[in-house]
Amino acid sequence: MTELNNKIYSRIALVGNPNCGKTALFNQLTGSRQKVANYAGVTVERKEGRLTTPQGRPITIIDLPGAYSLNAASPDEEVTRDMCMGKYRNEAAPDALICVIDATNLRLHLRFVLEICRLKRPMIIAMNMSDIAKRRGIEIDIPKLESILGVTIIPTIATKKGGAKNLLEAIHHSFKVPTIELTNETDLHVEVRKLLLECVENTSPTSLEFDEKVDRWVLHPIVGPILLLVLLFIMFQAVFSWAQPFMDAIQDFTTWLGTQLSYLLPDGMLRGLLVDGICAGVGTTFAFLPQILILFLWILCLEESGYLPRAAFLLDRIMASVGLNGRSFIPLLSSFACAIPGIMATRTIPSAKDRLVTILIAPLMTCSARLPVYALLIAAFVPKKTIWYLFNLQGIVLLGLYLAGIVAAFLVAFVLKKGKSSYENSLILELPSYRFPSLRDITFGLWQRIVIFVSRVGNIILTVSILLWALSSFPSAPAGATGPAIDYSYAGMIGHWIQPLFAPIGFNWEICVALILGLAAREVAITSLATVYAVGAVDTDAPTQLIHFLSTQWSIPTGLALLAWYVFAPQCFSTLAVIKKETGSWKIVIGTLAYLFFLSYLCSFVTWHVASLFFK
């Protein structure tokens, strides 16, 4: 708790422009002592963390959404503005502010600093990326800038261990109320130019030469898209190639655990629940965690290196060709992780129609929850072989599935927008400098994905596994029954009841059960199949056993039709709830379900019938 003028500060907010390194600094200060939620009444992400000063005093750090100005143009910026000014609902304003700026781009970031100074609140300026500025020959007279603004400025390097040490020490005693006089009529652009002339000198005008040379190729209208496609191709090859040893280790553990439970427990209901229900269902799903983490490793590296904003710039023309503005790229990119944050990110799109269309097509981006389903079906029905001595056929198919979702999204957008682009809302994007990814931030990002995945496994998937085991086990087969026992269970009854609807696309009743339960979470489809087919964790590992079972019991057209279904499959309940919250309309939710079901059914129908011509 920082003392200033006999006042105690226990809640401090981080503010700053996007891409200033604010979140990396937040991770440095708080480490794992943080929680993520939403601000009251809105779907804007809220991060809070705890730190302890060298003097032993606990402080709450709030990471406010990135903002370019306090003249809010989006819900994110509205939250930041209202929190800084103490006007956000019934929540108290932070006691003090840490304004994070990029030392390599002071022309942009100092304007926001001056807006914060107008608030006359205790603050510190964290001048991030100070090491990069020094390498580029950007000399900043920090004492003079401190004197003019009347606040403390602390150089930081958020991507390096210990890069926030000085800031942590300054939090105890260095907050000051700005003394620079700025009225509402002050031209902030003029003030920024004055500060740059007085306090900043660039001794190496060619310091940006490296970025410019790389961008000539990365942003080239022909070479750039080819490079992007190559990176995506390598990424999906890695998902299959790199993950296998880790998947084998998880499968070995699942096998060992199931075997031990079988030896320890007598034959009966409890043994069936633990071995056939939980070990088979949860264990089979958990084995695909390495593939998810490798996918996110690539995405985090591309983001940390500064490449992703350039990819957004590259794809702006393509987005415009289907009637969308380039601002739609970031929400759609987020949807590859999960459609929920992607849909929430559409708040930054000014055009109401563009925002709605982006929400409608975000579910077509292949979220990480679909990856385990893809991996299972590809392993079962696509040969594991190398093409041209270099390329993994399974990785090529995985890339094709992702591209199919993207192409479908563009076609749907083109139809909904009728090819009319919102040119008046052109994309304005700050391109950060290229940099080596921070090992700390990547590790932390992967750890968050593990926590989220384990949480889903422990809550949704475990619950559904137990429910499905009960549905598959009761009631028991009657005396003298000749068919499999599961045919007489509740799961069998439900599957057989709806199977005629899906018979034209080659789906059996077991798939029908998986589709219904998969509405809770996509990964549950694997759990459902493992439980319905009673794939246990004894004698052999459950995932391999399930893959072998599907490849021998299903036809190739059925497996390919199910892959086609999951490219367009109707969304999970959580995503539908977010669509309702963002649009406020049940009609849009129902319409989203209807068009996704239509596309899924149509593509599965075509895939099954075409594949049946070549495979029996």
Image: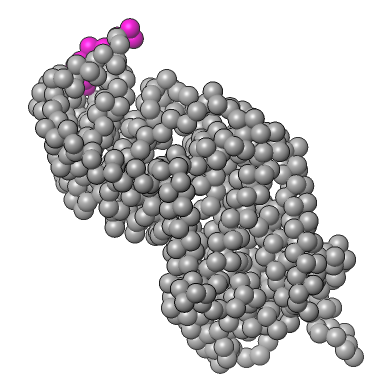
Residue 343, given in percent of the width and then of the height, sits at 57, 42
Front-most of residues 86 and 253: 253
User: Residue at (54%, 23%) from the top-left corner?
Assistant: 424
Query: Viewed as shown, does residue 164 lie left or right of 609?
Result: left
Q: Is residue 181 magenta?
A: yes
Query: Total of numbered circles in the picture?
Result: 0
Residue at the outermost right position: 480
User: Residue at (29%, 15%) from the top-left corner?
Assistant: 188
Dominant SS type (magenta):
loop
Can residue 47 be seen from the camera position used here? no
Q: Is residue 295 above or below residue 302?
A: below
Snapshot quadrant of residue 3: top left
Query: Viewed as shown, does residue 93 lie left or right of 25?
Result: right
Snapshot quadrant of residue 179: top left
First to last magenta residue range: 177-185
Residue 201, given in percent of the width and then of the height, sits at 13, 27
Please identify the quadrant where the C terminus is shown.
Answer: bottom right
Please identify the quadrant where the N terminus is shown.
Answer: top left
